[in-house]
Amino acid sequence: MGLLLPVALGIAAYIVSRFYPALDALFLALIFGIFFGGVVGKGNVEKIAEKSLSITLPVGIVLYGANVKFPNFYEISLPILILTFISALFMGLSVFVIAKRLGVGGKLPVLLACGTAICGASAIAIVSSILKPSKEEFSTAVIVITIVGLTGAAVYPALHGFLTKDDFATVCGATLHQTGLVKIASKDFGSDVLQKALTVKSIRIALIAVVALLVSLIYAEHRFYVPGYIVGFLIMSFMSSTYLGGWSDWIEPVSTIAFSTTLASIGLCVSRQDIQRARLSPLVASYIGWFFTSATIIAILRWLI
């Protein structure tokens, strides 16, 4: 089988996500990996998965920088820009604090906070390369964040009549976890709503560059050491907004498939029993942090801005 199994699972996840954008390719790859790992047997694929991880993780992280496009700030009003920063900060901190208070241990609170505040599974994958969490912590974080995000994408369209178009777009972009979910929640309300929601979301995606650097400085095994692939990611992020132009559209599928292969490799090493043993505390913390942040943002937009 060699590396073909995780690569095939990564490609399959990417293809399915293109047809069903609500299902993030990284999440699908993880689920595919867990399922096939149970079928094939964890012991038979663990070495293959570890070898795959050593290749696809750094490649995926560097190339993912092409997905990070710093927004055109002239398209965003200053109040909305500030509100989006506040939303990301408050969601991340609230999920982290609540998870800690509920007894969630290890590195899972940091993963949940970054996934909620920035861009879901992609942020978790990038931060995990620095934190080195257990595969069970990583898998739990991706699954929890995806469940909460899907809830938001399903519920938010009901808010459209309560908010103006601009406010609705802002709420979608500032509080939904993944870009695919932002598209799902806003696409039925006009191209202008969709475009503004994606512009607001791009602010949060751009923050992954800052978060990756901060986490490297705070949590790296050697203090103030930044891994080479994180440096490559930061350089690629800058180039995607300045020099790459249309090339970034060609790099995006390669990056996503590399990342998906990484998550498939992790899934192959994780048993369903490991996931089932996880308590509900991570899910509860993520729901509470996301819900109260979203409610606060809606209240500010409705009555203060």
Image (spheres, rainbow, N blue to C red):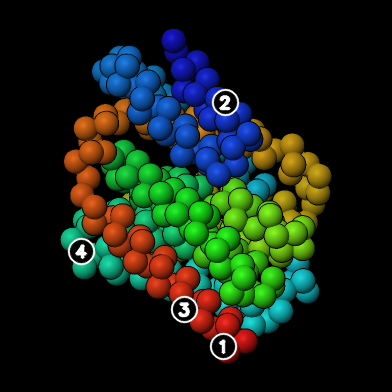
Tell me where residue 257 sits by quadrant: top right
Decide which of tag 3 and tag 4 comes sooner along the chain: 4
Residue at left 42%, top 65%? 290
The residue at which mark 4 appears reads as 102
User: Is disc 3 surrounded by few (<14), some (14 to 19) or many (20+) residues within 10 Å?
Assistant: some
The percent position of residue 262, horizontal first and vertical second, equals 46, 33
Assign a secondary structure to mark 2: helix
Residue that badge 1 annotates = 303
- The residue lying furthest to the bottom in this view is 304
Tag 4–tag 1 contact (CB < 8 Å): no
Are the residues at dot 2 and dot 1 in contact (C-beta closer than 8 Å)?
no
Q: Is residue 259 visible?
A: no
Q: Are marks 3 and 1 in contact (CB under 8 Å)?
A: no
Q: Position of residue 115 (x, y in %)?
A: 44, 55
Q: Which residue is mark 2?
A: 11
Where 298 falls versus 5 (above or below)? below
Q: CA distance from mark 2 to mark 1?
A: 46 Å
The kind of residue tagged 1 is Trp
